[in-house]
Image: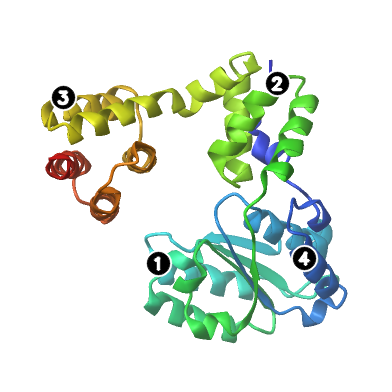
Amino acid sequence: MPSSNLMWVEKYRPQKISELVNQKEIVGSINSMLKNQPELPHLLFSGSAGVGKTTAALCVSREILGEHWRDYTLELNASDERGINMVRERVKKFSRFAGLDTEIPFKIIILDEADEMTTDAQTALRRIIEDTAKICRFILIANNLSKIIEPIQSRCVVFKFTKISTKEILPQLKSISKKEKIKVDEKGLNTISDYTDGDLRHAINILQAAASSGSVTESTVKSVVGLTKTKDVQDVLKLALNGKISDSRDKMIELIKVYGMSESDFLKYITQAAFSSKASNLEQMLEIIAKYDYRVLVGANPEIQLSALLAELAKVGK
């Protein structure tokens, strides 16, 4: 059984830049920048979830500020609903707060989810970055680089983090399993790796959840992530295409309400099911799914939208 109550993603988070998984070029570039700390530029880390962006930012902070890193690092989530005013107030206060310790070159501000800020907020942020340039360095973190305005991108050195490959994820999972003394088998680890698609944080979370049931096997992993239900999504699609909308909808509602499958996962699995069905009208089916995926994303009622999705698929099935 797992030996600790601490989340493993925190317990095994790399402490040094050199320990980052699979981002060799980025590690090399950052290390060479750290040789001349006073001239370190602002940094912008982009890439998909769970690949080490926030970890890299914290490592940079630790390596520059040493034991003072907690006192001189401000971590903010930029997507906070209070928006730019909150950022402005916190940054102002932080950049004023106490004179710089002689041992540190500058304070560091880490802004997570910077791509969730509105364009207006980003424009205001650009001014804040300029006003505090003498005493602060910003590390911005974004999943989607294209949502960051050009004037901010041009003030930063941009690093694009890549997804983590299976051959890099598996050794990490094995190493954690060994340290936590849990029973794992190869199939179980491969299932985690396939399901998480390059997101190491998600992979470690699933490993911990599966381990809590005693051992990590293909079946414990599948039950943790609800993969046993993917076959049911294929049935939902089949029923819809055969015009049995009511049955199809009942099964879909059961998956979401009873088994807790998220709407976005349902849409992901129905897309996979559409591909596996090798239907002749695949293009139409994918366009329909994409339309409802967008509607759910922008906040329309998921149950109504997914029912309408099945109804449209039934039309295509005819």
Location of residue 252 by image quarter: top left
What amino acid does circle 2 point to?
Val
Tell which tag, 1 or 4, sits nearer the viewer: 4
Question: Which residue appears at 49% of the width and 78% of the height?
Answer: 125
Q: How is the image coloured?
A: rainbow
- Above/below status of 252 relative to 128: above
Pointer 2: what residue?
184
Whether residue 307 sits left or right of residue 97 in the image: it is left
Q: Residue furthest front?
A: 280
Work out whether mark 3 precedes mark 2 in sequence or the reverse, and give the earlier one.
Answer: 2
SS class, disc 3? helix
Question: Which residue appears at 65% of the width and 39% of the height?
Answer: 9
Whether residue 260 sits left or right of residue 55 in the image: it is left
Location of residue 3 by image quarter: top right
Q: Which mark is residue 83?
A: 1
Marks 1/3: CA distance? 45 Å
The picture places residue 307, in percent across and down from the top left corner, at 16, 38
SS class, disc 4? helix
SS class, disc 2? strand
- Above/below status of 208 relative to 114: above
* Labels 1 and 2 touching (C-beta < 8 A): no
What amino acid does circle 4 point to?
Glu
Pointer 3: what residue?
247
* Labels 1 and 4 touching (C-beta < 8 A): no
Q: Quick one: label 4, few (<14), some, or many (20+) residues within 10 Å?
A: few
